Structure formats: structure tokens, C-alpha cells
Image: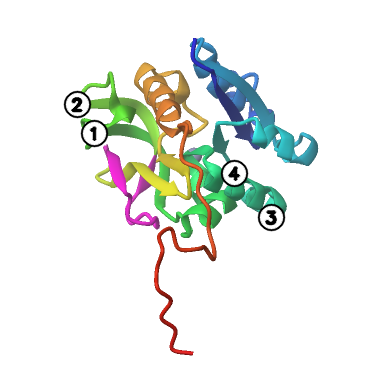
Amino acid sequence: MAEKIRVTVWSEYILEKEYEHIAAIYPSGIHEAIADIYREEAEFEVRAVTLQMPEQGLSQEILSQTDVLLWYGHMVHEQVEDEIVERIKKRVWEGMGLLLLHSSAQSKVFDRILGTTGEVRWREIGEKERVWVIDRSHPIVQGLPMYFDIPHSEMYGEPFEIPAPEELIFISWFAGGDVLRSGCCYHRGAGKVFYFGPGHEEYPIYYQKEIRQVMKNAVRWAAPGRGVQVSFGKTDALEEVEIFSPR
Ligand code: ZN
């Protein structure tokens, strides 16, 4: 059998402890519920970590044993230490995949790796979100219908302060009339990055079957391939070249 994809799920793990209605949906924390998506398949090896753990859950050792990192931040983006953010960025450049979920658009990790604030317009009235597949040949949409509905969602709407997606996978429409580029792919160094909009913690979104399909597909897509060893900096000519110097 092929080697397993090593998945690490990170979250703040704060709201689930503060609010009963959120704990009712995610009793072990949203990170555990997300990790469970991958525990359904033998091809993944999963661990769930949180902000409260040593080194905020992401020691160098854990990161170097991670093929794809999932990031779920919401309330305390600023508490994430810059050193941890730098560590993540370096691993992405080396080839680690990164899934940035929902409110993680406003996180330091998003800003440092993608270069923009991820600001959006938003409202919480539990309206319907319709997720349209835009890139129908992309690996992330395998097994999905042309569109699917999330019965109750938080609205995240354009303008969305992101770099132009290299691949636009989904556009969401909201019952209140807004739209969002809700599935966006990027490459940074050797790493693949996917932003996925749905995931507000007050609704059971991560239990929905289409969402679970996207999450699995996205990790498969973001997992590092064998890649190519490269080098940077000053280098000798590969062929014999007559030196022509103005000096
Ligand atoms: Zn939210």
C-alpha cells in the first residue's frame, strides 16, 4: 500500500468550551470533528492539535511529520506566535499542503502565506448558502454535484481581500443576495494551499456529506508529491561557455 497522507488539524478550541450550543455540535472540539472526516479513510493518518498545547500545538517535530495542515482559527488570531507562523510558512515552501478553513482567512497564517488580509463582508442570520462548482475537472470537486446547499450558514461575501486565485474551485451564493469566491487554490513554493469558506461553528457544517467530500479531496490534492529537488543561488554553467566579461 502507498504511504499514508499525514494530516494535522489545528484549531483554537475556545468557542466550543465557552458556548453550550457550539459544544452540542462539536462536543470534542471542531478539530476532533474535522479529524474524524479523515479517520473514515485508511489512506490518512490524522492528529488533532490546539492552541493550548505546548508550542501552540505545532512543534517543529509535529510540523515536519505533517503532509497537510488544516487551520481553523476564529477568535484569537493574534495569539498565534509569529515563530509558529514562520514555521508553517517554511514548511509550506518545502511542500507541506495547507487548508485554510472559514474564518482562518483573517488569520496571521493566511496573511503571511498569501499576502493579504482576507477581509470579507459577513453576517450571521443562518441563511442558506449554495456552493457552485466552477472548475468541474479539478480533483477537489470529484464526486460532487453541480452545486450543493448548506441549509444554514454564516454569510461571507465579496469583496473578499484575497490574491486572485490561481484556480477558482467554488463560488457561493447566499440567500441574502451575496456571493463569495469560496474555494480558491494557490501554490507557494513547493506547497499547495486551499482556502475553503464554509465551516461556521454554530451549524453542523462539517458533518454534511458534500463538505466531507471536499475536505477529503482537498487534502489528497494538497498532499506533497515526490517533487523535484531544486537549488537556489549562484551556480556554475551547465555547459562549457566562453566567459565574456565586461570587467
Ligand atoms: Zn464563522
Q: Label 4 crowding class (10 Å Cα cut-off): few <14, some 14-19, many 20+?
A: many
Q: Specify few, some or many for label 3: CA neighbours under 10 Å numbering under 14, 14-19, or 20 or more.
A: few
Question: Which amino acid, by three-letter code, is at mark 4?
Answer: Arg
- The image quarter containing residue 164 is bottom left
Q: Position of residue 143 (x, y in %)?
A: 28, 18
N-terminal-most mark, 2 or 3: 3
106 vs 128, left or right, is right
Q: Nearer the viewer, residue 202 or 240?
A: 240
- What whole-number distance in Å separates the C-alpha atoms at marks 2 and 1? 6 Å
Quarter of the image holding residue 82?
bottom right
Q: The residue under label 3 is which amino acid type?
A: Asp
Task: Check contact, mark 3 vs mark 1: CB within 8 A.
Answer: no
The residue range painted magenta reads: 155-175
Q: Which residue is mark 3?
A: 82
Query: Badge 2, how many Cα within 10 Å: few under 14, some, many 20+?
Result: few
Residue at the far right in the pictured view: 54
Determine whether the residue tagged by mark 2 lies in a helix, strand or loop: loop
Identify the image quadrant of residue 194. top left
Location of mark 2 (residue): 146
Q: Residue at x 52, y 31 (%)?
A: 201
- The mark nearer the N terminus, 1 or 4, is 4
- Relative height, residue 146 to residue 164 (above, below): above
Q: Inspect the image, locate mark 2, and give the three-letter code of the amino acid beneath it.
A: Met
- Whichever of callouts 4 and 3 sits on the residue coming sooner in the sequence is 3
Question: Which element type, helix, strand or loop, lies under badge 3?
Answer: helix
**x and y, in percent, of residue 232 in the image:** 53, 58
Colour style of the rendered protein structure: rainbow
Q: Amino acid at mark 1?
A: Trp
